[in-house]
Structures are given as C-alpha cells and as structure tokens.
Amino acid sequence: MSKKLPVLGIIGGGQLGSMLCEAAGKINVKTVVFSDDKESPAKNFCNRFIYSKYDDLNIIKKFSNLVDLVTFEFENIPYEILNLISKDKNVIPDPKINQILQNRKKEKSFLNKIGIKTTNWALIESKEDILKNVNLLPGILKTCTLGYDGKGQRVINNIDDIKSDWCFSEEYILEKKVDLKKEISVIITRYANGNFSIYEPIENVHKEQILQNSKIPAIISKEILEQSQTNAKTIVEKLNYIGTMCIEYFINEKNELLLNEVAPRVHNSGHLTINAFNISQFENHIRAVCNLKKIDLNKNSNAEMINILGHDIENYRNKSFKSNEFFYDYLKKEIKNKRKMGHLTILKN
Ligand code: ADP
Ligand code: MG
C-alpha cells in the first residue's frame, strides 16, 4: 500500500516557494503557502494560499491546522514564529538550526568551531571595534541578520570610510575582503535516516553582490571539489539537518577554499538542478522533509543558469526559445530594478 502523503505548509511565497510547490505537485504532495505578500508568485503554484503578516497568531494557528508539517523558503523568519508553530506541527529544518544560520556571528562561530575555514572576521558593535581590527581592511561590514543580495553590506577600504554618523545600532561582522578567483556553491539534501543526495559544485558569478549566473561543471581542482563536498556533509551531520541546504564558498587567489555562508533552504544557484538532474534540489527538499523515498541522483546534462533581473524580463517574455533552453517567469506583479524576475536555464553537452 502506498504511504499517505502529507499536506505540506510552506512559509514564504517567492520564487523559491513557487518552485517548491511545483516540485511537490509533481509527486502529489499538496501545499499550503503562508506569505506576508498578497501578490506572492507562489499563489499561482500552491494548492492553497494564506496571506497575513507573520505575527498574526490567529492566522498562524489556522495555517498550522491545515497542514501536517511546515517548511520554509527563506531563513529570515523570526525564530519565535517557527518555534510557536513547532509546538503544534513539525517544522523542518529545525528552527534551532535556523537560529544559528540566520545570524552571521553565530553561523561563522559554529563553522570555525567545527574546523571549517571561513573568511577572517570579527564581531563589530562600535567604531572602536573596527579600529581594533584594521588588519581586516579592506573589508566588508555586514549586518549579522536579515541581509540578502548584498543588502546590509558596506565596503570599508580604510578607516576614513567610517562615517561619523554611523550609529552601530545592531551587531555587525567585519569580514576581510577576499581576492576572489571564483565562487562556488554545493547543494546537499539530508534525509531523516542520515542518507544524503549531494550535487556537484556549481560555479557562480555575482555582480554587485547579486547572483548573475551559475553553471556546471565548475572548473575547479579535484581537491577543492572534494573538500567542498566533505564540508557540506560535515555541516549537515553536525546540525542533524533535514532538507536541502546550500553552502556558498569563495576560492581565493591562493586557491584556498573559504566558506562564505550557509543557507538552510533551497537556493538560487541550484535552479539548474530542475533541468540538469533527474531530481531537483526542490524535489529533494520535499522528499526529505516529508520523509519520502530518496532517489539516486543522475545528471542529464551540463547546464548554465542566467538570472533575469528587473526590466530585462520584458525582453525574455517576447522571446522564443530553443529546445535546450528553459525560461521561467516568476510572475511577479511589480518589476523593480535588480529584482529577480525570472531565469533561463540552458542545457549543454
Ligand atoms: P548575501 O547574504 O547578500 O548573499 P554574501 O555574504 O553571500 O551575502 O555576499 C554576496 C556576495 O558579495 C558574495 O557572493 C560575493 O560575491 C561578495 N562578497 C561578500 N563578502 C565578500 C568578501 N568578504 N570578499 C569578497 N567578496 C565578498
Ligand atoms: Mg550569499
């Protein structure tokens, strides 16, 4: 007899939520999306859509009653909310893991403690803290929480860049600026029984801190390839993590592998897994959190993914595509400069 499939709650209704819903639909898992944006793209892909601010306890209760378990598309959901839901229903990945990984200080401390090399960094709470860490300049000052696509980051080349009106109202980290040779990411999905699916490293190009394109294979040495995957396995095991996770790395001019950040969720750099593999990062996530069978990964093809930002989407909407090109329109209501509006994946030999 086949197992009864759970109804999956997903917090967040952006493009990642949409792609999770599509992957769930493919294997007959029903989805309920809870989003604080009335016009969420995922509205078009889920079975049921609930709109509310994330702190409305009555609606959270309603959402929780409709589903068997809950996952999320982004890590910046307040811990209290996830923790509250977890009193009623399983929240996977575990909100406690989120609490570590949504804070750059906690994230980097954890990684360094388990022996994984990151960029050199220091906790910054005042101007004096920067002056104590001038060895980290030129550096990047990042807010500990709530940053994405470069938001919450400032480059500091020298102490003159520290403006007198900065009030240091929250915690920051200062990170040494890395001479980047390359950036790669590794996507891994861990299942509840400890098995995992791991994708080959993906090579990423960022412009103004926003991902522009991703491709496989990444042109890297065998040592870096193995180290990047070994680290990924260590991290998911140490955290007893369930679901898909993305690990972003820098490779510096000395060919050292430095971990940049860990995303406890599906990731933009993994969009090419939809077309290039038999099982995408999204389907793997759904299978892992719903405790369904893991299917061995098979690569169909090499691939490149191009992010479509802002008004560029209008050109793509009028284009015709070849049979090896896959265009995704996130159906966002409003076009904004630099906003991720869609992507194109090109399969290559
Ligand atoms: P976000 O949370 O916005 O993704 P990241 O820390 O990953 O923040 O930074 C976004 C991008 O900015 C990186 O992928 C990289 O291209 C660049 N960047 C961030 N930190 C550094 C650094 N210390 N040295 C060099 N480049 C960096
Ligand atoms: Mg990043």
Image (cartoon, grey):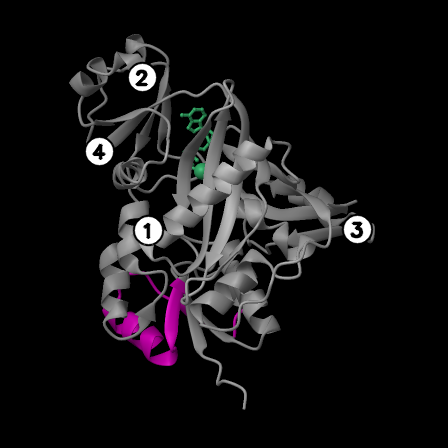
Q: Amino acid at mark 2?
A: Leu
Residue 70 located within the stretch drawn in magenta: yes
- Secondary structure under the numbered disc 4 in the rendered image: loop
Which x, y percent locates residue 148? 41, 40
Q: Amino acid at mark 1?
A: Lys
Binning the other alpha carbons within 10 Å of mark 1 as few (below 14), some (14 to 19) or many (20 upward) gives few
Q: Is residue 37 above or below residue 126?
A: below
Mark 1 touching mark 2, by CB under 8 A?
A: no
Residue 136 is tagged as: 2
- Secondary structure under the numbered disc 3 in the rendered image: loop
Give the alpha-carbon distance from disc 1 to disc 2, as whole Å. 29 Å
- Secondary structure under the numbered disc 1 in the rendered image: helix
Q: Amino acid at mark 4?
A: Glu
Q: Which residue appears at 50% of the width and 44% of the height?
A: 229
Q: Which residue appears at 27% of the width and 68% of the height?
A: 86
Which residue is identified by label 4? 171
Which residue is identified by label 3? 324
Marked residue nearer the N-terminal end (4 or 2): 2
The answer to whether the beta carbon of the residue marked 1 is less than 8 Å from any atom of ligand 2 is no
Q: Which residue appears at 79% of the width and 44% of the height?
A: 349
Q: Is 107 on the left-hand or right-hand side of 272?
A: left
Residue 238 is tagged as: 1
Split into quadrants, the picture shows ligand 2 in the one at: top left
Give the alpha-carbon distance from disc 4 to disc 2, as whole Å. 17 Å
Magenta span of residues: 46-71
Nearest the eye: 178 or 170: 178
Marked residue nearer the N-terminal end (1 or 2): 2
Residue 4 can be seen in this image: yes
